Every structure is written in C-alpha cells, then in structure tokens.
Image (spheres, grey):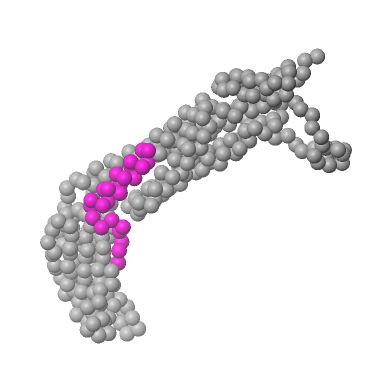
C-alpha cells in the first residue's frame, strides 16, 4: 500500500501541494506544480518525546488544524487592488488637471464688510471709513475705504494669495490671508465676502497691534500648483505599484508585491493629505479614505496569508 502524500505549502508562491514521501533516507526535491519552484521533502525521523502531551496524548485535546485559505481569496484581493488603483489614477489625473487650470489668467473682485466686534457696551455695527489695504503677489499694494454700511470692493485682483488688512481709528487692526483662483477660492470673493470683526483698542499701542486670520495654507499661486502637481506625481507612483501588486496577486506570483501594492494604496493618499490639498478640495479626503480602506484590507489579509506559509495544512 502506497504511503499517503505529505501536505506542504510552497515557500515561493504559498500554494498548497501534496507530495509523495521520499523513498529513502535522503532529502528529495520536487517541483511545485503551480510555480515550478523546488520544494525539499525530508523523510520522517523518529525522535524521543519532548513534551508530556506526546507521552500522554489522551490527556490533551488535539489542536485544530489550520484551514487552507480559499483559492478565490487572491483574486478577491486583486479585485480590491484594482479598485484602489483606479481610484488613485482618477485622483492623480484630476489634481493634475486642476493644477493646469489654476494657472489660467483671470481677474477677481475682492469684497467684504467691516464690523465692530460686539462688547458689553455696544452691539455689532458696521464701521464706515475703515481703511482697507490689499497686498497680493505680482502687484503693488492697493487701498480703499469702507462705505457707510461697512462694505468695500477692490476690483481687478490677479489670482493667487493675498493679504487684506483693515484698520479704523479706535479699533485694533486685523489681517486676513486669503486665496483666489479659478479652481479654489477662500472668502473674499464677490460670492463669499470677507468679514472683519474689529475689536476696540484700549490704548494707542493696542491699536497698532494687528491680529491675523489665516484662511488658506497656500500663500501664493505657485505653491498651490506645486502642491497639486506633487500630489498628482505621488498618486501616479502609488498607482503603478498598486497595479503591479494586483497583477501579482491575480497570477499568484510574488506575494510580497501584493503587500507593497496595498501599502501604496495607503501611503499615497496620506501624502496628499500631508500636502493639505484637501483644504482646497474637501472631496479629496473622502476619496483618499476609500483608497486607504482598500489598501489596508489587502495589506492585512495578505500579510496573514504569508505568515501561514509553512504551517501544516488540512486537506481540502
């Protein structure tokens, strides 16, 4: 009667194999039927008992044998990586296009309103005659004064970062750091006017002290476009690695590349969030969360599958 085959797992591709026992005392090498990688089969050698459960097996319940991972699991992980790859590619292309569109020339009207901050003595009210100074990149400073209702407008402003300062006698001055472009705008545009809330100055030195409110992480147009295109390049690199991992998982080759593909789906969106692109496009955060979820799932499951390589198998 022939000896039953020995259940093993290929150390190269991780696939389960069942090989015949060696006919003699020497180690026999067999080729993996899945990838062709050589697998050594060592003949059984008797050894003395080392643990009490070997001497008294009836006193110890047997441990359950580990289950063989489903053969469809690599294709499922490959599908998740493909979905993450598509999401990364779409995000990379969108940010690259937005960066190119942001460089288009344009002219904007900076608008807003100057109000007195309410306190225990007075309620909030518009400040008439407040002095507004606009400092933007590529142009000389411009000034205007607020109307009777506290509103103001400064037309013909070039796209990019700008600093708007408001000051009035008896009030502390205040500065707003804003950004205007064809693809991203903070407050200060005609559709979303900026609002100054000036507090009363207790003395002359307090009046000259300005408080600054930063509403954008991008100080100029060049930095904004650089952040978009840098994010697009990082996402494109993550797309390439993620696609390679999806192919490796589908073909059941190089299981470590599947982990690298999932890690790329996690790290590339994180780098985009570090560059604060989501401050200009809030939908980037939700899109990044989807790709991070796909990548983290693949990394976790594939890492467990790789850790199971070499453990005894339960026949299917």
Residue 234 is one of the magenta-drawn residues: yes
Q: Main secondary structure of the magenta part?
A: helix
25 with respect to 220 (left or right): right
Q: Position of residue 180 (x, y in %)?
A: 23, 55
Name the quadrant containing residue 176.
bottom left
Nearest the viewer among 148 and 238 is: 238
Numbered range of the magenta stretch: 213-237
Q: Measuring 34% from the left and 45% from the top, which residue is drawn there?
A: 231
- Residue 188 location (% of width, % of height): 24, 61
Residue positioned 66% across, 20% down in the render: 28
Q: Against 180, is 194 above or below?
A: below
Residue depicted at x 23% and y 55%:
220
Quadrant of the frame with the N terminus = top right
Q: Is residue 27 shown above or below 282?
A: above
- Outermost residue, top side: 1
Q: Split into 4 quadrants, where in the image is the C terminus?
A: top right
- Taking 316 as reference, is 230 above or below it? below
Instruction: Confirm whether the magenta stretch covers residue 146.
Output: no
- The answer to whether 14 appears left or right of 270 in the picture is right
Nearest the eye: 125 or 160:
160
Rendered location of residue 76, percent (x, y) = 54, 32
């Amino acid at each position: 009667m022939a000896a039953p085959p020995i259940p093993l797992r290929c150390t190269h591709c991780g696939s389960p194999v069942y090989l015949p026992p060696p006919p003699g005392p020497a180690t026999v090498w067999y080729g993996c039927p899945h990838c062709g990688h050589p697998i050594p089969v060592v003949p059984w050698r008797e050894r003395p008992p080392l643990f009490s459960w070997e001497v008294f097996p009836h006193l110890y319940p047997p441990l359950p044998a580990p289950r063989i991972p489903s053969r469809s699991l690599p294709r499922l992980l490959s599908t998740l990586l493909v979905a993450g790859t598509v999401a990364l590619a779409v995000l990379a292309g969108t940010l690259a296009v937005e960066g190119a569109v942001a460089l288009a020339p344009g002219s904007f009207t900076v608008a807003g309103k100057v109000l007195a901050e309410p306190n225990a003595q007075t309620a909030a009210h518009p400040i008439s005659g407040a002095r507004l100074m606009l400092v933007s990149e590529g142009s000389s400073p411009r000034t205007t004064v607020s109307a009777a209702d506290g509103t103001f407008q400064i037309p013909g402003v070039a796209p990019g970062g700008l600093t708007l300062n408001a000051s009035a006698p008896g009030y502390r001055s205040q500065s707003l750091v804003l950004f205007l472009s064809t693809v991203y705008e903070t407050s200060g545009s005609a559709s979303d006017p900026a609002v100054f809330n000036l507090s009363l100055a207790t003395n002359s030195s307090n009046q000259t002290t300005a408080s600054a409110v930063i509403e954008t992480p991008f100080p100029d147009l060049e930095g904004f476009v650089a952040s978009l295109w840098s994010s697009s390049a990082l996402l494109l690199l993550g797309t390439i690695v993620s696609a390679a991992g999806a192919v490796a998982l589908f073909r059941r080759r190089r299981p470590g590349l599947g982990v690298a593909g999932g890690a790329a789906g996690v790290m590339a969106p994180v780098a985009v969030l570090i560059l604060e692109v989501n401050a200009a496009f809030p939908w980037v955060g939700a899109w990044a969360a989807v790709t991070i979820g796909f990548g983290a799932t693949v990394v976790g499951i594939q890492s467990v599958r790789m850790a199971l390589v070499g453990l005894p198998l339960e026949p299917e």
